[in-house]
Image: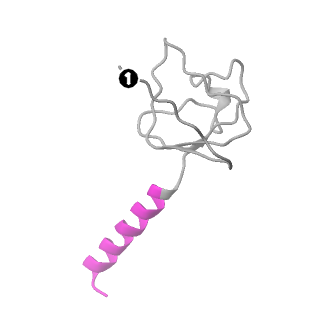
């Protein structure tokens, strides 16, 4: 296998891994169930722009108050059951 193909294969493999991994998980370990509270996240820091987050059912929150900008990449929510979405017209 040539060096070009090896590098291309390696990059594709890393991109696939990166696309399926979630950097931080919601633990609800802090006070107030706030998105911005670092102790509510698995890495003890609120997500930064581009970070992928996972929010599992069974926890309260997260609450995003009006003074906080919630930043992340992909947000994946877990659990079982059905969810109803409410849409409102603006």
Q: Where is residue 62 in the image (x, y as percent from the top left)?
A: 62, 27
Residue at mark 1 = 89
Residue at image coords 56%, 22%: 36
Number of numbered discs on residues: 1
Task: Point out the image quarter for the N terminus.
Answer: bottom left
Q: Position of residue 75 (x, y in %)?
A: 50, 41
Say whether residue 23 is magenta. Answer: no
Residue toward you, 32 or 84: 84
Please, is residue 4 above or below residue 12 in the view? below
Is 2 contained in the magenta span? yes
- Magenta segment range? 1-19
The answer to which image quadrant residue 53 occupies is top right
* In-front residue for pair 26/2: 26
Tell whether 2 sits left or right of 20: left
Apparent side of residue 47 relative to residue 90 in the rendered image (left or right): right
**42 to the left or right of 11:** right
């Amino acid at each position: 296998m040539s060096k070009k193909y090896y590098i291309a294969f390696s990059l594709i493999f890393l991109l696939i891994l990166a696309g399926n991994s979630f950097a931080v998980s919601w633990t609800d370990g802090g006070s107030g169930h706030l998105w911005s509270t670092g102790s509510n996240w698995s890495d003890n820091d609120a997500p930064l722009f581009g970070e992928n987050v996972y929010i599992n059912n069974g926890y309260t929150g997260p609450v995003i108050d009006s003074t906080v900008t919630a930043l992340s990449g992909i947000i994946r929510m877990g659990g079982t059951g059905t969810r109803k979405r409410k849409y409102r017209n603006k």
